[in-house]
Each structure stands twice: as structure tokens, then as C-alpha cells.
Amino acid sequence: MKMIIIVRTDIEMGKGKIAAQVAHAAVSLVLASMGRSTWNQWLEAWLEEGQPKVVLKISSLSELLERIERAKSQGLQTTIITDAGRTQVEPGTITCAGIGPAPDNEIDKITSDLKLL
């Protein structure tokens, strides 16, 4: 089991901003998974396994959205993080997205070719 957060590299964000956006995605995925049968079972397994998270990079918004649509079509929990625009990016900017928690092999079908951030 794992959770994947995919961060856009085509926009300028400092390390702290990236960390905050990744945290938003992780919390969002956990909250969305609670109370849903399959997703909740995956959430419980993920929690028991130490909450593995992998942060990957992607070079465009269109590619990020395409990966998220693929994940949704496979029945995986997803989230898209849109920034409020109070600091480093324009309001409404999509900064990152997440998939999971889910079995490794399900997520790998969508993200195995992406590099670590």
C-alpha cells in the first residue's frame, strides 16, 4: 500500500511551499478515504504499514490531470490541490495531486514512469 503525491515542476514554488502542498494532498486523501468501504480498507492497511508516501514530479498541468483521470477511471481515490494564491502562486493554481492510499500495483500502473521529486 502507498500514497503518491505528484508535484508540478513547471511552476515556481519554494521548498516550504511544496511541502505544504504535499501535506494538503496527503490530508485530503486520508479524509476522502474515511468511511468508504474499499477505500477505508485500503486506508486501514496503509496506516498499519507505516503510511508510505512517495512524492513524484511532473512537468505539466495537462499530464498531471491525465494521470488523475486514469486513476479515477481505475476506481482509485484522488485529490487535486488548488492553491489559494496568498504567497508564491496565482490564486487557483493547481500545484499537485494525489492518488491513494491503494495497493502498489494499482498505483504503479499510472505513475511508475515518473521520477522522484
Image (spheres, rainbow, N blue to C red):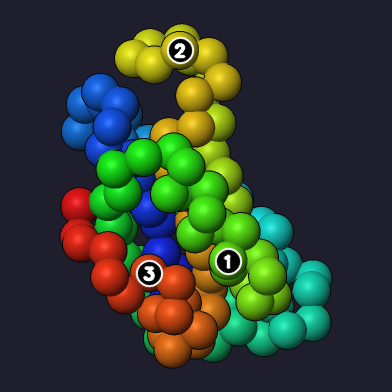
Label ID, residue 111: 3
What amino acid is found at the position of numbered circle 2 in the picture? Answer: Glu
Closer mark to the observer between disc 1 and disc 2: 1
- Crowd around label 3: few <14 · some 14–19 · many ≥20 (10 Å): many
| Gap in angstroms between the C-alphas marked 3 and 1 | 10 Å
Nearer to us of marks 3 and 2 is: 3
First in sequence: mark 1 vs mark 2: 1
Q: What residue is at 26 percent from the left and 38 percent from the top?
A: 9
Coordinates of residue 51 in the picture (x, y in percent): 41, 73
- On residue 70, which mark appears? 1
SS of the residue under disc 2: loop
Q: Is residue 49 above or below residue 91?
A: below
Residue 108 falls in image quadrant: bottom left
Indicate left or right for 109 with 36 as reference.
Answer: left
Compare marks 3 and 2 and give the one earlier in the sequence. Answer: 2
Q: Is residue 18 left or right of residue 65?
A: left
Dot label at residue 90? 2
The residue under label 1 is which amino acid type? Arg
**Mark 3 and mark 2: span between their CA atoms?**
27 Å
* Residue appearing at x 53%, y 39% in the figure: 81
